[in-house]
Image (spheres, grey):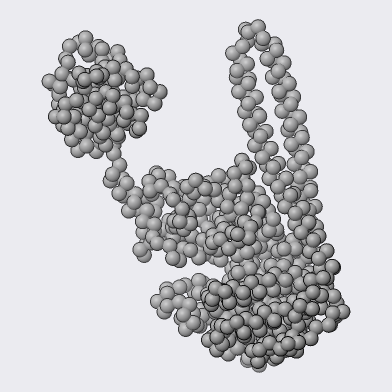
Amino acid sequence: MNKNKYVEIFIREAEEHLQGLRQGLLALEKEGFTEERLHDLLRRAHTLKGSAKMVDLLELSGVAHRLEDQLKALQNGEKELSSDLIDVLLVASDAIEALIAQANAGGSISVNVDPVVEALETGSVAEDSPGKQDQVAYQGTERRKSVRASVERLDQLVNRAGEILLHHQILDQRGQQLKQLLKGFDQLLGRFVNAKDYQNMTSLRDEFQSLLEAFEQDRVQLGYQTEDVYQRAMELRLLPLATITDDFEHSLRGLARNLKKEIRFTVQGQEVELDRNMLDAVKPILLHILNNAVDHAIEDPETRVRLGKPKAGQIHLDAQYEGSFVQISVRDDGQGMDPEKIRAVAVKRNLLSADEAAALSDEATLYLVLEPGFTTREFITDVSGRGVGLDVVKANLEQVKGDLALHSVVGEGTELVLRLPLSLAVFAGLLFACGEEFYVLPQHYVTEILRLTPHDIHEEMDREVVIYRDRAIPLHSLSQILGTESSDRIGNRLTVLILKFREQEMALLVQKTLGLQDVVVKDLGCQLKSLDFFSGATMMTNGIPALILSTADLFAARQTQEGLQLREKFARQEAQRRKGRILVVDDSITTRTMEKNILETHGYEVTIAISGFDALEKLDKSRFDLMVSDVEMPGMTGFELTRQVRQREDTTAMPVIIVTSLASDDHRRQGIEVGAQAYLVKGNFEQGALLETVETLVS
């Protein structure tokens, strides 16, 4: 085997899949069979098979292929889950590890995989199958270790550079705070024009100004250096797309020959650069897309000639920069995707019910090909029919915060457009709050921020929607999706984010937005690695942590989320909304009951107090818009109560109405002196007078 420049890229990819395979197999044995776990194992084996074939590691590809066969048989019920089967599959993983070591050593390590192939075919492990001896050879490869260590140091360097970039943004805020302090100092200084120490304070102010100017110069210089360090660190990780596309043509031609087809593969934009981690993620994505194009899309030569097409199928890959993103499109001139056929297959494979399939638009139907287990093939080949394919594209895109658009015309061809960030280390994100927590979404998923009223929420087909650019977009609540606590009260202004993902849209209700920020991505750690809805964390410029949301998980969760019923909640809230909260203080049960009934009948919320002391306790616990008080009460008169109300900081502006039988001018004057806004005499008391006075003072 001749080692080429792509083997190192393959080794990094294969190591991750190998680790996932072993962990999944052990979990399968300990925790039992689940479709999700088995499908992950199938996907990893499928990717190992295809990637190994691309770099001419045919023995490794063959072992992965047979391992995939065993997993598929387990999925189909042709084999039972047993310890013996797990033993065979683990031995196969040992052989793959040994073959990776052989590839890394340039063939100097000898590996005999024949016993492993026999074990995979017979279901029993031979004594001389590759085992610990081969594993030791692989684990002891110093060259692999040194490469891995240097990559880790490079990742740490980029991460630290990103943190420096974040702290420079914090310095920007500190500079603004210093300017505000200086402005306040100037305002204070103006009060001491005639003071003895005015000259000293002016001198202090000038020193403060000089320090601020020096700080600004240092901040600007640090900004230049920070940006330069970050860009240089990023450049160390950047590799051209040609690193992974150069060998595609050879691989695709080999696949086309096996399928007795002819293709013409062209690439434009090979000089476009992405960081190493992104390239590692993009490679299997493009591999599956291209393999599917050859296998599913391109017709055989005779059919193409009969249709008036060139004998060789055309597949074109194009890459270009788009701001801080890279857009990669793969186009073919094949048969295109037929929405009706896709619907029929989805129903047949129980991915959708017949009614659900019929309700899907043609555009939305195309995206069913990304679902796990979807295949239009009725028979299994080395390339297709296993239900493992384009869902790999979907899974890997979600990991790198990328997006995908599908366009297809029956008989003319298909185009898949990938939109990827240049780096996984830093991205522009929108910060927002929901409840008491803070979250981030990559900016490119957010198309609009809407400020709405509850009246802007409409109902359509038993769901709540918002109208955005003449489109009805389903409304969902982030707190409801995440299962976090939120206030039942609906404010007069709602903050709604319009998100777009794979050409689908959703409106997401949040509490408030906090602006854009360059987000330095932090891993959640192995304990939280599989946490739903979150793909990482970051620090905001104020030092508070924020969680990075997974857009793919949000869109997936909306399918099962119950209706918000915001319109009903708001209607109930409006019906229950009071004109104001009033505290009625009177020791007479008759008087206070009558006043309470009058006020509540006209929409006010009323609380009763039977004395002045009782009223003060209630004022400590709640806020009121107005107080109605009698004068002659035991322990504390209404005049004394009103005087204390005026002395309290939280109630000094609260209107007070005195309602009493004391009708003299002296009593009226005393009521006004202690701070009452109105004085009504019980003997002349009329319901209309009380209501009119209350309405005037509350409004």
Q: In which quadrant of the rendered view does residue 111 lie? A: bottom right
With 312 as the anchor, is 355 left or right in this view?
left
Total number of numbered labels? Answer: 0
Q: In which quadrant of the rendered view does residue 275 lie? A: bottom right
With 433 as the anchor, is 537 left or right in this view?
right
Residue shown at 66% from the left, 74% from the top: 22
The answer to whether 400 is drawn above or below residue 194 in the figure is below
Residue 80 at x, y percent in the picture:
55, 85
The answer to whether 448 is drawn above or below residue 670 in the figure is below
Residue shown at 48% from the left, 57% from the top: 482
Residue shown at 40% from the left, 23% from the top: 649
With 345 as the anchor, is 629 left or right in this view?
left
Residue 59 at x, y percent in the picture:
76, 84
The answer to whether 41 is drawn above or below residue 699 in the figure is below
Please, which residue is most extreme toward the left here? 683
Q: Is residue 697 at least partly visible in the picture? A: no
Q: Is residue 647 at least partly visible in the picture? A: yes
Please, which residue is most extreme toward the front here? 127
The answer to whether 489 is drawn above or below residue 383 in the figure is above
Q: Nearer the viewer, residue 498 or 596?
A: 596
- Which quarter of the image is occupied by the N terminus? bottom right
Residue 453 at x, y percent in the picture:
40, 47
Residue 273 at x, y percent in the picture:
76, 62
Residue shown at 69% from the left, 67% from the top: 281
- Which quarter of the image is occupied by the C terminus? top left
Q: In which quadrant of the rendered view does residue 194 lie? A: top right
